[in-house]
Image: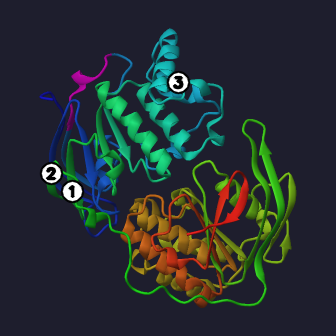
């Protein structure tokens, strides 16, 4: 590992409108064949540094130097570096696995006769060679991530960057990903993994680079101590609030997809007003599908959904009544400022300016982001974007809040902070809260009730 592949020299970057730099005089090198872990709490600069290596930063103030040894690449039709983003799903644009993995080489003008072998080789490296004709849209989070990795490998980079690759994965998916990356390292790939919790990759990481507030504060060969990942609180959980009636009633809903078969099998559920409910399930269990049925985005084959007094509602009937925070909150953001983002639904509901300004201020205060009101949402850290998206769905004061994998990409302090915010909602806004996740809650005492989705059916969880 003596061949220098990446050299970063005094790299600094400040996002447009930001008061503080996202990166501050970063200096480091990476040799061919190494596996480097960039670690630190959410917002420390990990994703920004990866974007800088890929040359993806636009606008703002950038200084310093990033050099990738192009001679280390695989020759013509290759790229020196490739990146798998935090939300791998956002990289998937084609309707079949084969088209997805072929897309990169096609854009590199690789001769057609070479693309097929590249596609097969890349898919074999991630264990997805038997899914050439499948539509990635129906895949589990772990399968989508494998396809995203294969689509990068098909461009034959020597340097592979992965941004929070476990954020959408359950324990099984994390173990499978660690096995895939171990195989890639043996094949000669150089890996840079940005992770706030690198424990699944402990066996293949050569060095850890610790970031804090945009600065490189430490470099070490051993993993950070276990106290760094501690995720249990000691203070008591806020008391629950409840009212008469129910926010959600589900009776025997069933749904099946042609390519995967039964996803939901007779799901029934009643959620009282003001309840804090946690629905647990592994990747591919059907949690997101259930949430789409509950929010009117997908019609079940059989059964009935009663949502805030509406029978089998359409999505256009739900603004102001039901708020949905999807798995990838950045996909819900489109406003030029945080204020514009949070005010959007309120303005569409016809509130007067004094009314919506009051609601915006309330939502920003609840989510603890009032100081970001003039910032552009897409320039914020993942955790900040998450809270902006949450504020936008809370501003109408919904009766029911549905959250799909809300902890993905957040470090443990931010997960606890999010639980604190959500715990206030029943008493403060009268909102019922349903969290769907493959992760355990950072504090299991938060939930009034915990259910598990397995085999298409719901059941009570036993502890």
The span from disc 1 to disc 3 (Cα, nearest Å) is 36 Å
Describe the element under mark 3 as helix, strand or loop: helix
- Sequence-wise, the earlier of marks 3 and 2 is 3
- Sequence-wise, the earlier of marks 1 and 2 is 1
Left or right: 195 in relation to 210? right
407, above or below 32, in the image: below
Percent across and percent down for residue 313 are: 83, 66
| Residue picked out by circle 2 | 220
Residue 347 makes an appearance in the image: yes
| Residue picked out by circle 1 | 210
Query: Is residue 223 rendered magenta in the image?
Result: no
**Image point (31%, 56%), residue name:** 60
Percent across and percent down for residue 376 are: 44, 65
Left or right: 407 in relation to 8? right
Q: Which residues are magenta?
A: 67-75
* Comparing labels 1 and 2, the label whose residue is closer to the camera: 2
Which quarter of the image is occupied by the N terminus? top left
**Image point (56%, 30%), residue name:** 100
Residue 337 makes an appearance in the image: no
Describe the element under mark 1 as helix, strand or loop: strand
**Is the C-beta separation of discs 1 and 3 under 8 Å?**
no
**Is the C-beta separation of discs 1 and 2 under 8 Å?**
yes
The span from disc 3 to disc 2 (Cα, nearest Å) is 38 Å
- The numbered mark at residue 228 is none
The span from disc 1 to disc 2 (Cα, nearest Å) is 8 Å
Percent across and percent down for residue 315 are: 76, 63
- Sequence-wise, the earlier of marks 1 and 3 is 3
| Residue picked out by circle 3 | 102
Mark 3 nearby-residue class (10 Å; few <14, some 14–19, many ≥20): many
Color theme of the render: rainbow
Describe the element under mark 2 as helix, strand or loop: strand
């Amino acid at each position: 590992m003596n061949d220098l592949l990446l050299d970063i020299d005094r790299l600094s970057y400040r996002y447009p409108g930001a008061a503080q730099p996202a990166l501050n005089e970063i200096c480091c090198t990476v040799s061919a064949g190494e596996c480097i872990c960039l670690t630190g709490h959410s917002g420390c600069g990990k994703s920004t540094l990866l974007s800088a290596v890929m040359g993806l930063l636009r606008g703002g103030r950038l200084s310093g130097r990033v050099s990738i040894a192009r001679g280390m690449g695989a020759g013509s039709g290759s790229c020196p570096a490739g990146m798998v983003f935090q939300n791998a799903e956002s990289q998937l644009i084609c309707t079949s696995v084969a088209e997805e993995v072929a897309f990169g080489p096609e854009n590199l003008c690789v001769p057609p006769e070479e693309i097929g072998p590249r596609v097969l080789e890349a898919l074999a490296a991630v264990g997805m060679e038997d899914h050439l004709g499948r539509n990635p849209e129906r895949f589990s989070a772990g399968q989508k991530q494998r396809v995203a990795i294969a689509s990068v490998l098909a461009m034959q980079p020597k340097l592979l960057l992965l941004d929070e690759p476990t954020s959408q994965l359950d324990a099984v998916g994390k173990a499978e990903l660690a096995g895939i990356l171990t195989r890639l390292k043996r094949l000669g790939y150089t890996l840079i993994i940005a992770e706030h919790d690198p424990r699944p990759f402990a066996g293949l990481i050569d060095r850890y680079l610790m970031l804090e507030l945009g600065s490189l504060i430490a470099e070490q060969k051993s993993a950070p101590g276990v106290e760094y990942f501690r995720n249990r609180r000691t203070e008591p959980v806020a008391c629950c609030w409840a009212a008469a009636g129910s926010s959600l009633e589900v009776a025997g809903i069933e749904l099946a997809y042609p390519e995967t078969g039964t996803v939901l099998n007779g799901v029934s559920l009643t959620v009282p007003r003001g309840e804090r409910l946690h629905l647990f399930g592994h990747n591919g269990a059907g949690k997101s599908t259930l949430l789409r049925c509950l929010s009117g985005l997908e019609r079940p084959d059989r059964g009935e959904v009663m949502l805030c007094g509406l029978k089998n509602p359409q999505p256009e009937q739900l603004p102001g009544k039901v708020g949905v925070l999807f798995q990838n909150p950045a996909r819900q953001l489109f406003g030029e400022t945080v204020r514009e983002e949070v005010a959007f639904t309120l303005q569409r509901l016809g509130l007067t300016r004094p009314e919506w300004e009051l609601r915006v201020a309330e939502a920003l205060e609840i989510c603890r982001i009032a100081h970001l009101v003039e910032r552009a949402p897409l320039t914020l850290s993942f955790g900040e974007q998450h809270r902006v998206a949450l504020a936008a769905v809370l501003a109408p004061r919904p009766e029911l809040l549905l959250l799909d994998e809300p902890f993905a990409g957040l470090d443990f302090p931010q997960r606890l902070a999010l639980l604190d915010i959500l715990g206030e909602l029943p008493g403060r806004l009268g909102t019922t809260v349903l969290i769907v996740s493959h992760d355990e809650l950072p504090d299991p005492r938060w939930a009034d009730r915990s259910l598990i989705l397995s085999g298409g059916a719901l059941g009570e969880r036993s502890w």
